[in-house]
Amino acid sequence: MPEQNPDTWSLIIDLDDTVVDLRSPWVEWIERHFGIFLEGENLTNYWIEKCVPPEIGEKVYGFLNQKGLYARLNPLKGAVEALQHLNELGYDIMIATAYVRDPDSAADKIRWMKQWLPFIDRNNPFLCHRKERILADCFIDDSPEKLIKYRGAWSFLRQEPIIMTIDWPYNRTPEVDASIDYRALDYDDTVTAWKGMVQFIKQRLPMDCVRERREARGSH
Ligand SMILES: [Mg+2]
């Protein structure tokens, strides 16, 4: 468990499809290679191989296996500006991201963060799959499994972390709704989604008198 600084709030933020625009170039790649166009609303399963006919299935992972993929990926609109703003306000921003199949993708992701999120402390990225092991005041992710696991991991705390997601068709489930505090609308307008999340963070975890508020909450 990382040490908590009593004078700030810590945020654990996912990279892929929360900050990095991974899914829209992936959908374009699938269309180019297999002639199938997935509308946003067709993305009803987090595992994209389940959104295409079974004969294509795992072949969609050819996209993720491309060398140097992250160098060509852009941020979701509004994400970098939102993180920059939160950083300027003094929030402790940690990025937690799983590296994908090729281990080189871990280095790719670090390079991506250096390029697009240079204001984030170099000690702050976590490259891991089991994000629910990292306690923070706020957790943002798009994966149904990770949102549910994070809620479950810390639900014994008197003051539970705030959990948020950008709304995607694949995370619209009753289990996710029961696990999150805020659903940001939506994947098709991430500028508005990120503005909503920033507003919610500022409202629920205000940066004035953090130490006093933390003690009053009796939180970790
Ligand atoms: Mg993600």
Image (cartoon, grey):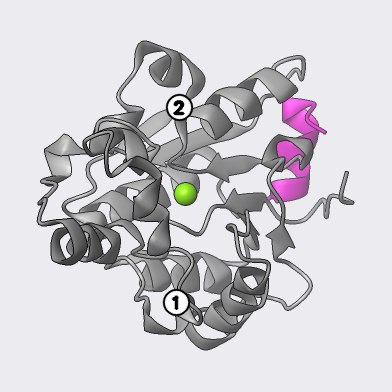
Residue 76, position in %: x, y? 31, 65
Q: Name the residue located 36 percent from the left edge and 52 percent from the top edge.
A: 59
Residue 137, position in %: x, y? 66, 41
Q: Name the residue located 41 percent from the left edge and 42 percent from the top edge.
A: 200
Examine the residues drawn in magenta and state their main secondary structure.
helix
Residue 216, position in %: x, y? 75, 29
Question: 160 above or below 167?
Answer: above
- The disc labelled 2 sits on which kind of residue? Asp
Reply yes or no: does residue 219 show up in magenta. yes
Reply yes or no: does residue 218 show up in magenta. yes
* Left or right of 136, for residue 70: left
Name of the residue lying farthest toward the front: 55
Q: Which image quarter: residue 34?
A: bottom left
Quarter of the figure that contains the C terminus: top right
Q: Name the residue located 35 percent from the left edge and 30 percent from the top edge.
A: 171
Instruction: Of the two numbered discs 2 and 1 on the same chain, state the one appearing first in sequence.
Output: 1
Tell me the residue that label 2 is attached to: 181
* Residue 17 appears in the picture as rendered: no
Secondary structure of residue under mark 1? helix
- The disc labelled 1 sits on which kind of residue? Leu
Q: Name the residue located 34 percent from the left edge and 18 percent from the top edge.
A: 173
Question: 20 above or below 53?
Answer: below
| 41 vs 12, nearest the viewer | 41
| 68 vs 128, nearest the viewer | 68
Mark 2 and mark 1: Cα distance apart in space: 33 Å
Residue 90, position in %: x, y? 62, 67
Tell me the residue that label 1 is attached to: 69
Write down the region rendered in magenta.
208-220
